[in-house]
Image: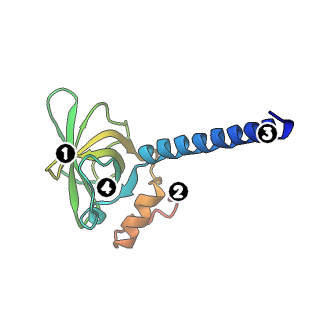
Amino acid sequence: MTRKQKRLVIIGGGVTFIVAAVLLVMVAFSQAIAYFYVPGDLMKADLAPGTRIRLGGLVENGSLKRGEGMTITFSVTDTLDKVPVIYTGILPDLFREGQGVVAEGSFKEGSPVFVADTVLAKHDETYMPKDVADRLKAQGVNLGGKENIQ
């Protein structure tokens, strides 16, 4: 092999390695993506069963029920539509009815029930995730004059 051929083999191997690494990273990211929806958006969305999403909105007043063990059911609403949620685990300390929440998980197959594996609650009196606040404001929800939304 000549010097020029060796150089081409090394460059070709390097380019192949870089392309393979980029493809692996793209596949890993596409599997980890969880799109954000509010209950009103879910009516328009065409989701395949088992698709991981983030569901955001307000915990509906009067919907929080504790089941056996650590199972909790509640509804997430954008004041127009609501989605029933089942969560098994320890809820954040600041989780309560009427407060902002983001739940991550998927829908039960053939059921309108959302099974959450992660629940996030707002961390102080003026915080709500920007996506949730923007979607709620777009639907005409009064957030109580909380202009310090981050």
Q: Which mark is residue 150?
A: 2
Q: Nearer the viewer, mark 3 or mark 4?
A: 3
Q: Amino acid at mark 4?
A: Leu
- Say if mark 1 contacts mark 2, CB within 8 Å: no
Which mark sits nearer the N-terminus, 2 or 3? 3
Q: CA distance from mark 3 to mark 4?
A: 64 Å
Q: Is residue 136 left or right of residue 127?
A: left
**Residue that numbered label 4 is attached to:** 58
Residues packed near mark 3 inside 10 Å, few (<14), some (14 to 19) or many (20 plus): few
Which mark sits nearer the N-terminus, 1 or 2? 1
Q: Nearer the viewer, mark 1 or mark 4?
A: 1
Q: CA distance from mark 2 to mark 3?
A: 57 Å
Q: Amino acid at mark 2?
A: Gln
The residue positioned 77% from the left and 42% from the top of the image is 8
Q: Is residue 124 left or right of residue 76?
A: right
Helix, strand or loop at mark 2 = loop
Q: Is residue 66 left or right of residue 125?
A: left
- Say if mark 2 contacts mark 3, CB within 8 Å: no
- Say if mark 3 contacts mark 1, CB within 8 Å: no
Q: CA distance from mark 1 to mark 4?
A: 21 Å
Q: Amino acid at mark 3?
A: Gln
Helix, strand or loop at mark 4 = strand
**Residue that numbered label 3 is attached to:** 5
**Residue that numbered label 1 is attached to:** 108
The residue positioned 22% from the left and 64% from the top of the image is 81
Q: Amino acid at mark 1?
A: Lys
Q: Given the current orientation, which residue lies at the most extreme right position? A: 3
Quadrant in which the N terminus appears: top right
Q: Nearer the viewer, mark 1 or mark 2?
A: 1
Observer-nearest residue: 83 or 108?
108
